[in-house]
Amino acid sequence: MIAASASAGQIEDAFAAEQRGDYETTLRLFQPLADQGDATAQFSLGVMFANGEGVTQQYTRAMQWYRKAADQGHSLAQYNIGVLFENGQGVPQSHAEAAKWYRKAADQGYAAAQTNLGMIYHKGQGVPQNYAEAAKWSRKAADQGEAAAQFNLGAMYSDGQGVPQNYAEAAKWSRKAADQGFAAAQFNLGVMYSDGRGVPQNYAEAVKWYRKAADQGNASAQNNLGILYDEGNGVPQDYVQAHIWLNLAASRYPASEKENRDKAIGNRDRVATKMTPAQVAEAQNLARVWKPTLASK
């Protein structure tokens, strides 16, 4: 009992040193405990090697320590092993191995692992594609408040994947994620309000949710917000604001979304034909100094 209390105190001291950024002390305290088989210390050493905290970043060493903790049932270590396999960090990339380790953590109720396992089933990576399984694991994580899982479950209800299509349920789960500041969910909720799908059509609400996502840099939300300013739906018509948001959308769409980027450019240039040169210059300057904000709830 005394030894257990001493170990617990040493772990607390190690975490306190980590919080201070004193990784030398953190390593000195965790190492002997890890060598003695303490799963928390083993997991913590894995995190240090994965992040390069006080040691040279080495994913192979991180995997070694995660594995020791995971073999003792440490759910966070099991999850982190899944992440390393999914990303091919320190090990050859293997979605099948990622799914295996995510499942171990998910079976223990770890929400992030349930979310990732749901996504793997949705994509059919390392496991046969199975929307019902994707929805099952997403729901388990969503019920624990995991925003990404709530967003995914909302999207599955919208598309009728693994669950009966139900726009009201899609809106419900999208709102839960949106209320946590999840930009993609905020965008989806904006679309629902704009189209009147699962909720009564309400352009003012659409503007509200598009803006929250747009402020975080979501290009699709910026594009749609710009269109609403151009049309005067949900907001007073304002070509300067329309140009700003469409210009930002055009600049933030990745190369893989060339079609969307070209549409945003077309929308921006169309709005510019309704503006004076001074207004265009003002909009360009405001877009130039714009910076994304933290998640808005």
Image (spheres, rainbow, N blue to C red):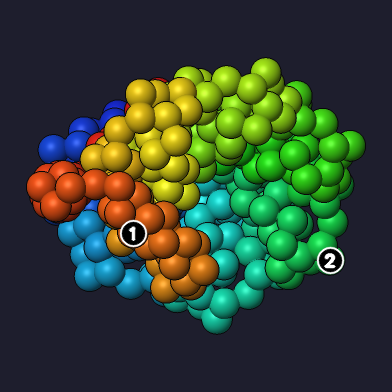
**Residue 125 higher or lower than 217, as above or below:** below
Q: Residue 61: x, y in percent?
A: 39, 70
In the depicted structure, whether residue 207 falls above or below residue 72? above
Give the Cα distance between marks 1 and 2: 45 Å
Instruction: Look at mark 1 in the image and give the residue it sits on.
Output: 269
**What amino acid does circle 2 point to?**
Pro
Q: Which residue is mark 2?
A: 128
Bin the neighbour count of mark 2 within 10 Å (Cα to Cα): few under 14, some 14-19, many 20 and up: few
Q: How many marks?
A: 2
Residue at 28% from the left image edge and 53% from the top image edge: 272
Query: Is 216 placed above or below 62 here?
Result: above
Q: Which residue occupies the foreground of this view, 237 or 56? A: 237
Residue 141 lies left or right of residue 261; in this view the side is: right
Residue 88, horizontal then vertical, whole percent? 51, 75
Rendered image: mark on residue 238:
none
The crowd level at tag 1 (other Cα within 10 Å; few <14, some 14-19, many 20+) is some
* Discs 1/2, front: 1
Q: Does residue 223 appear in the picture of this structure? A: yes
**How far across and down, in percent of the image, does residue 229 sit?**
38, 35
Give the residue displayed 51% in from the left and 38% down from the top: 187
Mark 2, secondary structure of its residue: loop
Tell me the amino acid under the disc marked 1: Asp
